[in-house]
Amino acid sequence: MKIVIAPDSFKESLTSEEVAKAIKKGFQQSIADVDCLLCPVGDGGEGTVDSIRHSLELEEKWIQVTGPFGQKEAMRYFQKEQLVLLEVADLVGLGKIPLEKRNPLQIQTRGIGELIRHLIAQGIKEIYIGVGGTSSNDGDIGIAAGLGYQFYDRYGNVLLACGQSLLKLASVSIENRYEIPEDVQIRILADVVSPLCGYQGATYTFGKQKGLDPTMFEAVDQAIQDFYEKFSPVTLEIKGAGAGGGIAGGLCAFAQANIVSGIDTCLNLINFDKKVLHADLVVVGEGRLDSQSLAGKAPIGVAKRTPVGVPVIAICGSLAEDLPSLPFENIQAAFSILEKSEPLEDSLKNASLYLEHTAANIGHLLNMRKI
C-alpha cells in the first residue's frame, strides 16, 4: 500500500517534516506492507521553505542583516544556482519575538530589503519569499527602507521604518531607492487572499494575533490606506496584498514582486503530481482545520491536486465547528489527534505522539478492509 503523506506544519509545535515522520511511524506500526512517501508541504505560511528545501536539495546560507529591533542578526536563505527561497518569519517571525516585546508597530523588517539587494548583487534571478507567520504590521515600509526608500514626518525628520511611523508619515524620498532589474523575478508565496486595508485586510484580520491593541486598528489601517493612496493606489486592489502584515502588498509596490499561490507553487517545486502517481491514499494535515483552510491553505491545495479516485484524509491537531460536512474539497475523512482534555501547551508538546497514535488507529481500520 502506497501512502503519500503531505501535511503542513503544526504551528508552534512541529514542522511539516516532523508531522510527516510521526504519521509514517504510526502507519508502520499497523500496516505490514505500507510504503510511505514523505511529502511535507507549506502554503506560504511559516515553515514553507523548510518543506521545500530538501526536495530541491537547496544549500543553506546565512547573512547579517538588520534584525527586528535594529540590531544586526544572522538570517538564513536557501539557494540552488540562480534560485533562492527565503522566509520573512526567519527574521521577524512571531515565534522569534518574546511575549513582552510583541508590538507589531515596533518591529523592523528592513533586513528583508537588505537581503533582497544582496541576493540580486550575487546574480540571483529567481527569489521565492514566504511571508506568513510574521510579527510586524508596518505596511512594508521596513522592507522599503532596506531597498533605499526614506520616510519623513511633516517637519522633515527621518522616521524609523516601522509601523509606528505610519502615524506620522508625511513624505517619502525615492532618491536612493534600489531598482529591481527586469530579469529578476520575485514571487511571494501567500496563503491568504486578504486585501491590504479594510475590515478584511492585514490590520483587522491579523493585528490582534501579532499583539496590536484593537483600539489601534482603525488608526493603523487608515494610515496604511493613506500612504498607499498616495504612493501606489493599485496595490490597494491586489488580492492577497494583506499577507504578512502587508508585506506582500509592499513587495509588489517596492520590489515589483508578484503574489502566487503558496501551496500550488510548493507542489510544483517539489514535483508533487509525479509523486502522487499510483498512490493508494493521500494524507494531509495542519494544526487546525477550519473554514479558513478552504481559502488556499495547504490541506485543500493538496487534496485538489490529488488525482480523482485516490482517497484523501486529513489528520489535524483539531477540527473547527465551522467545517462543512464531509466529504468536502476531495477530503473524505478528517481526524483530530487530541486524546484527552488538557492544557494547550501539553497538547503541543505531545503532538508527535498523538499523531503516531492516530495514524496507527487509521492503519488498523484500513487493515479491516482486507478481512
Image (tube, rainbow, N blue to C red):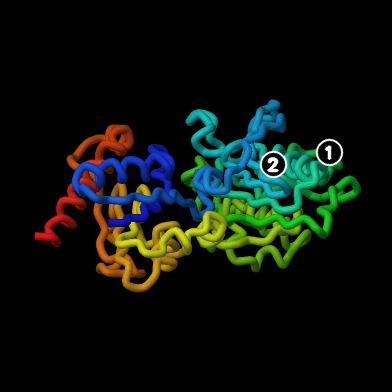
Q: What is the three-letter code of the residue carrying label 1?
A: Asn
How many neighbours does mark 2 have within 10 angstroms: few (below 14), some (14-19), or many (20 or more)? many
Q: Is residue 150 visible?
A: no
| Kind of element beneath mark 2 | helix
| Kind of element beneath mark 1 | loop
At horizontal 40% and vertical 53% (from top left) the residue drawn is: 6
At horizontal 8% and vertical 60% (from top left) the residue drawn is: 371
Residue 153 coordinates in the image, percent (x, y) = 80, 44
Residue 181 coordinates in the image, percent (x, y) = 83, 55
Q: Is residue 115 visible?
A: yes
Please state, as top left, top right, bottom left or bottom right, where the N terminus lies in the image: bottom left
Residue 162 coordinates in the image, percent (x, y) = 68, 40
Q: What is the three-letter code of the residue carrying label 2?
A: Ile
Question: Residue 112's mark?
Answer: 2
Q: Is 319 placed above or below 95 here?
A: below
Q: Give the residue number, with chain letter if any, for mark 1.
A: 157
25 or 70, nearer to the observer: 25
80 or 180, nearer to the observer: 80
Q: Is residue 13 left or right of residue 351?
A: right
Q: Earlier in the sequence, mark 2 or mark 1?
A: 2
